[in-house]
Image: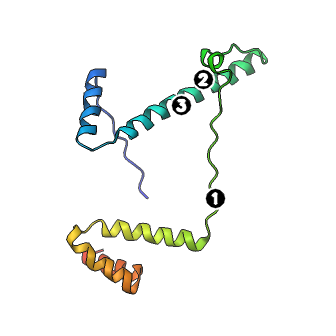
Amino acid sequence: MRPRKMVHAPMLSPGEAMYVIERLVVDRRIESNEVERYVSAMRDEIADLEQRLHSLRSALSGGLAVRSSREERKGFVSVKRPRSRKAVPAEVRASQQLQGRYLGLISQFPKYKRSQYQRIAKERGREAAMSEMRVALGK
């Protein structure tokens, strides 16, 4: 997997940013729930930073840190823990990886050509369909 290139966003005024977001939603390039998810993630990140600051202040003052305004309002700051992933059997993981490679190849074909490879995958398996797709793509 190649590392992602860093894309620098253009500097926009708040009004310009709002216009761009509204246009993206209208043009169906982004959904409103995605925008809400980003805003929620920003709030979570702020809460994490506030909790970290609180613990640093507490460590510095020997446990007598000043509570933040958010803590006073809510009573405490919840620490977000990463979700633990359930173990996936090796067979399932291999099947998922194969499916991912299959989807990556088939998405490179126009929709009207995909059906022949889908038929091959159904009849002879994904591996056979993938090998034929690679030949067709010259890979």
Q: Amino acid at mark 1?
A: Lys
Residue closest to the far right: 62
Q: Circle 3 is placed at which residue position?
A: 45
Is tag 1's residue or tag 3's residue first in the polypeptide sequence?
Answer: 3
Q: Amino acid at mark 3?
A: Glu
Measure how far apart labels 1 and 2 are at the Cα level. 30 Å
Circle 1: element type: loop
CB atoms at circles 2 and 3 under 8 Å apart? no
Is tag 2's residue or tag 3's residue first in the polypeptide sequence?
Answer: 3
Q: Circle 2 is placed at which residue position?
A: 50
Classify residue 49 as left or right of residue 65: left
Q: Quadrant of the N terminus?
A: bottom left
> Mark 3, residues whose alpha carbon is within 10 Å: few (<14), some, or many (≥20)?
few
Measure how far apart labels 1 and 3 are at the Cα level. 25 Å
Q: Quadrant of the C terminus?
A: bottom left
For the point 62% across and 55% down, the residue is: 85
> Mark 2, residues whose alpha carbon is within 10 Å: few (<14), some, or many (≥20)?
some
Classify residue 51 as left or right of residue 100: right
Q: Circle 1 is placed at which residue position?
A: 86
In the depicted structure, whether residue 74 falls above or below residue 35: above
x%, y% of residue 52?
Answer: 64, 26
Residues 104 and 11: in front is: 104
CB atoms at circles 1 and 2 under 8 Å apart? no
> Mark 1, residues whose alpha carbon is within 10 Å: few (<14), some, or many (≥20)?
few
x%, y% of residue 88?
Answer: 61, 65
Residues 13 and 112: in front is: 112
x%, y% of residue 24?
Answer: 26, 38
